[in-house]
Amino acid sequence: MAGHMETMEYEDGLKILEELTTNAHQIQERVLEDILKRNAGTEYLRGFLNGQADKQLFKRNVPIVTYEDLKPYIDRIANGEPSDILLADPITQFFLSTGTSGGQPKLIPSTAESFEQRMLEPTLEDLVMKKHFDGLDKGKTMCLFFVKPEIETPSGLMAKFFTTSYFQSNSFKNGSAKICTSPIDTILCLDNKQSMYCQLLIGLLQRDDVVRIESIFASVFARSIKFLIDYWKDLCSNIRTGCLSDWITDPGCKNAVSLILTGPNPELADSIEHICDHKSWEGIIKKLWPNAKHISSIITGSMSQYISLLESYCGGIPLVSPLYASSEATFGINLKPLSKPFDVSYTFLSNMAYFEFLPVNKASREKAQELQFNNTVSEKASIEMTKENGNVEPVDLTNVKIGQCYEVVVTTMAGLYRYKVGDILKATGFYNNTPQFQFVERQNVVLSIDLDKTSEADLLKAITNAKLFLDPLGFVLTLCSSYTDTSSTPGRYVLFWELRMKESNDFPKLDPRIMEQCCSIVEKSFDFTYKSLRKSNIIAPLQIRMVKHGTFDALMDFYVSKGASINQYKTPSCIESEEAIKILNAGVIGKFFSPKTSF
Ligand code: AMP
């Protein structure tokens, strides 16, 4: 399919999109039939289907699982057993997911065919953008793309991040890469710092040609702009003299830059210097890349913490969250790129996998917890209520109900059967016959003391409320993370915050009263259980630890040094690693508690 992709005409792409969304039900049925026909005889599925490729039997007998259930099979394959214990087609590579299992990265199987199939998404995404933004084919994309080293499994199969595999693929090299400012060697350079420097340098050299800017996740984009703030003088000096900095030693990067940085360009250096030599970085993107029509970067879910920072850099250039995907599968694309960040929905692509949706009743789950807390129902009754919610049947893609939240379950061409990805989505509408979903949360409880379980979504909501309070005061909360501090009793939740002034990049003068109020706003935003436990002093007052600029960069460096991919890196909303907490603590310059009578 990718063969067509490189040359796919705009009209053909639109036809595919219409077909996928209009005939979603039929396509989903075909996808499942195909998966079962091929794989019913595998050791895994045989146990449930007796070798029969029967869709009804599949729905009755195959259990809904998590990674832990499939791990024994995946580990056997990684250790040298043939792939066909789990899937009929040979596994060609594993993808490393950012999720971990017992401290190890998850290995997600991929086949040649399943990988090729996923190459359709960038093409469809591109055509949606072209539909909404004029002139995209008249210029280049400044990309900020990075790769990570691969790991070899004992069986000799390679494990890498999906994005690394994509950037190494012919589909990318012969497709999107051709319109990127970054030469492929700068993207494929394993030293992320040299790679980032060279990609920014070339993006600046070709600033007038740049019609869009792209990174996979908003965190990478934010990181790149910070890097620009730190290195703009060096970048300008390189442009002025026509000589690349000595510390760029990677031969691929050096060679690629030498083809573009062909001589001194003091005029360009002057104009960039004129733009950057200011206290304020407000609107920097618009000033440096005036022809950019949009910035493409995932900004939903845990990335939403970067929205205000990026908006301040963008200077009005729209921020577009283009897709929703994971190592396991590509799920959907954003057909309304101009939606506001908090309104983004993704339309599922019906040919990518077989999708099922487990209804999640958040409200009644919370109600059960609340009743249990008040002892108004017996513990047993409460568990029954929760179980009832846990026993619901999944629905097919085209049968979801608008307004309902679901946990997404995938069956892929590459050995995942009724696999819970761990994401909660809310159905928001339909395009043709295909539902669109808002990303709600990664189904994980991030902070927990006693009976309280605060989810990532609840934490982000509370932080958004504090941001709203800070905004009129001229403060921007740029980065944050948290952890449960149980070093003393009772334990408390601790938030690490990095703040800056709106109008300049300066560190703000901290008024303890304002900070205490922030603590209080966060606590007030938490749910009933939290507040009850706080009132009865089972949870100690929440603490905000202000960190100096650069602390979160050190945190990212730490995770990247531990093997995280810079492309797929997301500042964790909550941290468990003691080493990581130490890094954040080393940057602390102020600690503030919520007042005793917070609510
Ligand atoms: P990984 O497998 O490491 O690429 O991580 C995939 C996970 O990233 C997904 O399961 C989601 O939790 C998150 N993710 C990916 N795309 C989006 C998106 N558009 N919005 C919010 N979260 C996303």
Image: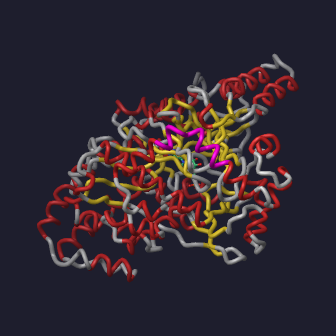
Give the residue drawn at x 42%, y 40%. 335
Which residue is at the front of the view, 583 or 238?
Answer: 238
Residue at position x 38%, y 57% in the image: 8
Report whether 565 appears left or right of 239.
Answer: right
Can residue 446 be seen here? no
Asked if residue 262 is among those painted magenta in the image, a careful observer would answer no
| Main SS, magenta residues | helix
Residue 69 spot, x, y in % from top left: 79, 53
- Classify 479 as above or below 341: below
Asked which quadrant contains residue 221, the reply is bottom left
Residue nearest the viewer, comparing 154 with 9: 9
Q: Is 312 positioned to the left or the right of 171 in the image?
A: left
- Residue found at x 78% / y 62%: 73
Magenta range is 19-32
Whether residue 109 is visible to the viewer of this picture, yes or no, is: yes
Pinpoint residue 109: horizontal percent, then vertical percent.
66, 62
Left-right relation of 32 to 335: right
The x and y percentages for residue 200 are: 31, 64
Which quadrant, please, contains the C terminus? top right
Q: In the rendered image, which quarter is residue 389 located in?
A: top right
Q: Does the magenta portion include 24?
A: yes
Q: Nearer the viewer, residue 474 or 383?
A: 383
Q: Residue furthest top?
A: 376
Foreground: 170 or 403?
170
Q: How many marks?
A: 0
Q: Is residue 459 above or below residue 371?
A: below
Q: Position of residue 7 (x, y in %)?
A: 37, 61
Q: Specify whether 255 is left or right of 479.
A: left
The relative height of residue 387 versus residue 192 in the rendered view (above or below) is above
